[in-house]
Amino acid sequence: MDQLDELRDLTIRHATGRRTQTPLPGMTLLACDAPTEPVQVMYQPTFCVIIQGAKRTVLGNRICEYDGGKYLVVSVDLPVTGHVIKASAAEPYLAVAMQLDPVAVATLLLERDAGGGSSVESPGLAVSTLTPELLDPVVRLMRLLECPTDIPVLAPLIQREILWRLLASEQGAMVRQIGSADSHLAQIGRAIRWLRSNFAASLRIDDLARLTGMSAPSFYRHFRAVTAMSPLQYQKQIRLQEARALLIAQRSDVAGVGFEVGYDSPSQFSREYSRFFGAPPGKDAVRLRTSPLVEQSVA
């Protein structure tokens, strides 16, 4: 049996819904039997193998489409718009995702020559064609779901092999920067973590630049290279996504939600929310409460 076919069969056998957390550390199965509407979500550092079907992801002005036999690497937390564009009951969209741990990557970097990673200007999201060398350990990892008693011993070893193969892959430069504390990606990651935790606060480029140890012009350039948007645009998307989550959770005070996420003007909040999500806050929340959402994760 072809290994991609075996991976498909294993995923179908063990997926219990659109998003299935497995006993394998940091591993998630994704399945969808119909195309979905575009949904704004937050992607986290992840390696994702697409088995069949297709999906489109928009990051800033970048559009990525990926289908069976491709893999996706996300290196930092990114607000994106994504939706499944090819799926059916007969051939559902299927994917397997593994979280990327910076500490695990850094440990591997100590065992190979990885110098010079800090000078590489990598995007935060990229798609490549799956190679046999990368597919093989993913299949062996998924086989452990058939024998759960092997997971504690063998899963960490195979996941380590997957990281090693990623470092040698077309996206190796990006993965290498995840584990390099002095890389531009790691520096921008510090700013991104601050923005996610302080999205309602006033933003000053000079303060974020100091946090990363860069000059303001250098910080701004590298931030755009990684995220495909400016720091202000990034903060705005985080604010609006947080507002949407609050509204879906039955919050009826639209103006109060706007103030909570950092907007001083209710009219500005409603205007920017409508522009971003395509409907006013209250109307959008009612619609989403009554319709299923696409999985809130990388896929």
Image: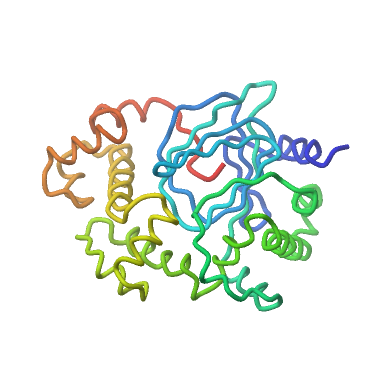
Q: Residue furthest bottom?
A: 110
Number of numbered discs overlaid on the protein picture: 0
| Foreground pick, 61 / 78 | 61
In the image, is 299 to the left or to the right of 254?
Answer: right
Quadrant of the rendered structure where residue 20 is? top right
Quadrant of the rendered structure where residue 276 is? top left
Q: Position of residue 18 (x, y in %)?
A: 57, 35
Residue sitting at x 70%, y 75%: 112
Quadrant containing the C terminus in the rendered view: top right
Residue sitting at x 49%, y 54%: 124
Quadrant containing the N terminus in the rendered view: top right
Q: Position of residue 252 (x, y in %)?
A: 21, 36
| Foreground pick, 86 / 231 | 231
Q: How is the image coloured?
A: rainbow
| Foreground pick, 150 / 68 | 68
Residue sitting at x 36%, y 65%: 191
Q: Position of residue 193 (x, y in %)?
A: 38, 63
Q: Residue furthest right?
A: 1
Relative vertical location of residue 280 with respect to residue 169 in this rendering, above or below = above
Q: Position of residue 75 (x, y in %)?
A: 52, 57
In the image, is 31 to the left or to the right of 44?
Answer: right
In the image, is 208 to the left or to the right of 79?
Answer: left
Residue sitting at x 51%, y 70%: 119
Relative vertical location of residue 25 with respect to residue 56 in this rendering, above or below = below
Quadrant of the rendered structure where residue 129 is? top right
Relative vertical location of residue 117 with respect to residue 151 in this rendering, above or below = below
